[in-house]
């Protein structure tokens, strides 16, 4: 099951590179861990959502947010009025995770049931950006989520820019964890008359739904009708 | 964009019930917030993954995990050797989120781009369970993720039970946040010759993939070939 635990007690020498620190090391099932930026970035490029955690006076919070991976850093954004954004912008220690669910793994034993998944846990801090850098990051964010869109969408005006906080999250350390393939049953269970295998799960775009104001002579762009996430 | 911020500064009186406390209140776009257990539980029933956050000495961690919603409480599990599980089991304050992504919302302005989503943020603490309660919770977990499976799968033996930590996460407070429907463009943008609308996103099960050891006379069960998550 996908608990990507960077904090368990058994030291590990995972195949995907060596862990830069104790904080980030994948301890449980270390053969599933990877620390190279290529593996990490491929997962971050495919995802659309991250979950960002931070603590205020010892109280942990975790919040779903969109993000963009731009030049190895993550762009986060939200309302200037948001206490979350203000807290993150103050440079507190933060941790975020992106998880792609690829399938349910049905083993013969309940114990070996699992999920196929690819996840990243990243540690770092965020800082606000302003001016041209902020304007470019907002374009980058739209383009990361929907490649091709910035050419069509109206860019931000001064009021919208003022209302929006844009943060750069610098990844200090990150690890990836990946499970793929069939169940890993105990040898003595393999002869049991039980169906075992994988139910693949995929995030699939449906037919685009134009709103009621789209003029009849404005076609649905290719980047909408053929929308898909980049895959490694 | 789906930043479900329970900690922003503007008080709110959302339609889905009143917020039980400051910690859990949805402050940004409060009309999207809901605090009734029916809304929260419908999202938790559909999800397969949660992201659990906690802090150790002020350092936040967030970890993807499977879960089950059973009798209004969440079942979490993992290896007894995991420091994450041990930390959670010690009763530290924790926060978890379940997010279902329903679509990309393409507005005419970059500013009003958004996502359709349903998310829950829950605060609480976990405690380990043992004996019959633990054994039942493991069955419940398999059955929550793959209804029908416990009848077929081999149950846990003593070694597997000893290796597994099972936690009950009692939800002290929870809030849901939901965005649905078309983009919310500025009135003056509606006449722009720009395609706008929603790209729906759905998590779709693919054709089941049996492993190489399934006997020829063992058919793929209906609960596998017709797998789907419950929807509200």
Image (tube, coloured by chain):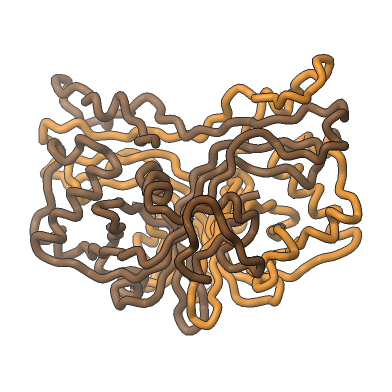
Chain colours: A brown, B orange
In the rendered view, tell whether residue B19 sits above or below residue B67.
below
Left or right: A212 in relation to B21: left
Residue B225 appears in which quarter of the rendering?
A: top right
Residue A96 image offset from top left, x and y in percent: 43, 61
Residue found 17% across the figure and 20% down from its top: A216
Left or right: B21 in relation to B227: left
Residue B57 image offset from top left, x and y in percent: 53, 82
Residue A83 appears in which quarter of the rendering?
A: bottom left
Residue A190 image offset from top left, x and y in percent: 83, 32
Which is more toward the observer, A115 or A225?
A115
Residue B135 image offset from top left, x and y in percent: 86, 54
Which is more toward the observer, A223 or B163?
B163
In the rendered view, tell whether residue B116 sits above or below residue A70.
above
In the rendered view, tell whether residue B115 sits above or below residue B31.
above
Would residue A105 be visible to someone looking at this image?
Answer: yes
Which is more toward the observer, A175 or A161?
A175
Residue found 38% across the figure and 56% down from its top: A65
In the rendered view, tell whether residue A95 sits above or below residue A187.
below
Number of marks: 0
Residue found 58% across the figure and 31% down from its top: A200
**Looking at the figure, which quarter contains the C terminus of chain B?**
top right
Would residue B35 be visible to someone looking at this image?
Answer: no
């Amino acid at each position: 099951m996908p608990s990507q635990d960077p904090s368990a007690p058994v030291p590990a020498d995972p195949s995907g590179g060596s862990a830069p620190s104790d904080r980030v090391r994948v301890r449980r099932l270390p053969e599933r861990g990877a620390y190279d930026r290529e593996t990490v970035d491929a997962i971050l490029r495919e995802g659309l959502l991250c979950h960002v955690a931070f603590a205020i006076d010892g109280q942990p919070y975790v919040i779903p947010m969109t993000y963009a991976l731009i030049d190895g850093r993550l762009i986060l954004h939200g309302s200037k009025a948001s206490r979350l954004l203000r807290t993150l912008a103050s440079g507190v220690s933060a941790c975020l995770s992106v998880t792609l669910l690829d399938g349910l793994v049905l083993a013969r034993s309940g114990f070996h049931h699992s999920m196929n998944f690819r996840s990243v846990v990243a540690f770092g801090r965020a800082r606000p950006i302003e001016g041209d850098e902020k304007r470019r990051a907002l374009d980058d964010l739209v383009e990361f989520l929907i490649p091709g869109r910035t050419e069509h969408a109206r860019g931000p005006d001064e009021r919208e820019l003022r209302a929006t906080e844009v943060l750069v999250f610098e990844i200090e350390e990150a690890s990836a964890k990946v499970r793929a393939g069939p169940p890993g049953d105990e040898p003595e269970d393999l002869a049991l008359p039980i169906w075992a295998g994988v139910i693949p799960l995929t995030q699939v775009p449906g037919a685009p739904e134009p709103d009621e104001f789209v003029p009849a002579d404005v076609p649905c762009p290719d980047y909408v009708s053929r929308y898909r996430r980049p895959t490694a």
